[in-house]
Amino acid sequence: MNRRRAARLATVLLSAASLLPLAAPAFADSAPATAPANSAPTKAPAAAPATTDRAALQKALDEVVADGVPGAVVEVRDAHGTFRATSGVADLASHRPAKAEDRFRAGSVTKSFVSTVVLQLVAEGRLGLDDPIERDLPGVVPNGQNITVRQLLGHTSGLYDYTNTLLQHPDPIRSARTATYTPLELIAMAGAHGPLFAPGTSWSYSNTNYTVLGLLVEHLTGRPLGEEIGRRILRPLHLRDTYFATTPEVSGPHLNGYEWLDGPGTAPTDLTVFNPSIIWGSGTMVSTTADLDRFFRALLGGALLPAGLLDEMRTGRLIGPDARAYGLGLESRTYCAGTPAWGHSGSVPGYETFSFTTADGRRQITLSLNRNLTNAPQTNDAINRVLTAGLC
């Protein structure tokens, strides 16, 4: 693997769901790393209800697989009900077909779960959005007295992304697969580099932010992050196929994750078994299309947060073309003209996930694929057709 390819693959691996412009790859050069401080919030015009073109959605899903993704699963909800579709296989060795109920690694969709828990703690008066992180985690974050909880949630803290340090490792994806890090070690990697900008003056997506927030949740609750997510979100919503992974295996029926790390025409590398410590609070959740749709329906419908904090969560900073915006653990994209959608994307080795709900709550889609960073360029167009068919 040449140096350029290795660096490109490593960027995808450890961004744990870098923000994608529409359905562009997680390593897209066009996706900006930073955004100016004075970006305006997005607007959310209402969308008229419409019936999903199920034939078009299935055709687009089949095109994703025809382009080299082993398997894909999708769930769409609209005013007329729920539609689930699959294409391809979950396991290349056994040729088991992908099933709608298969689990997968959801990557940075995890950030929406962590943000929800943090905002629930804000609602309970246990911290404030504009509290400095130094108050609760003294000495953990460099310049922590000037970095607020809000800035961590919205990626305006200026903290360097520790995953960039991991780019320096040889064969970074395979080495990360078995590597073990503590959250404090990941934060120390970022601190050794120094800040990208003064807190609150710009925007840069950083997995370090959600590693810090995970520690904050544990400090305030006295419980492990995964346990607190389970107690506050998974069990109340009956998300029985979703869990915060702490071991390398994916339990239950699932999509196996694959990448062609040695180039086209070579044998794929099965990355299903992967040590989650490297993505911890930024990307370790395992879920299904049905559970993610249920989570975002509850969150955006006001079942998990008071209205004021949900508004804070959806106050977006423009971060790229096509009205892309990022709020507090939520991203907004406009797949359909004049109809923004809120949710999150997720990207880890072997898996790519999109889960979005239109601003009026009438249409939802969750799509997951079991190949990501080595997809062919044309695959992204097919992915975009799936998302457009589901949301428009």
Image (cartoon, rainbow, N blue to C red):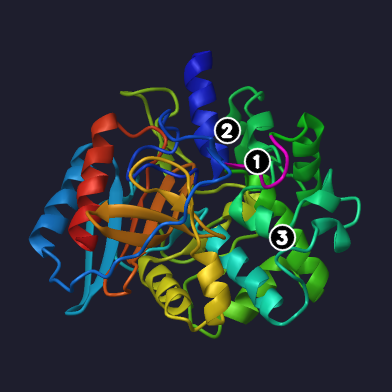
Give the x, y percent position of residue 70: 29, 44
Label 2: element kind: helix
- Residue 337: say if magenta: no
Give the x, y percent position of residue 68: 26, 37
Q: Is residue 167 above or below residue 270?
A: above
Q: Residue at x 58, y 56 (%)?
A: 284
For residue 54, side relative to residue 328 (left or right) = left
Residue 362 lies in quadrant: bottom left
Q: Nearer the viewer, mark 3 or mark 1?
A: 3
Q: Is residue 273 above or below residue 247?
A: above
Task: Name the residue type under label 3.
Answer: Val
Give the x, y percent position of residue 38: 55, 46
> Which labelled disc corresponds to residue 149?
3
Q: CA distance from mark 3 to mark 1?
A: 31 Å
Give the x, y percent position of residue 304: 54, 80
Q: Which residues are magenta?
A: 197-203
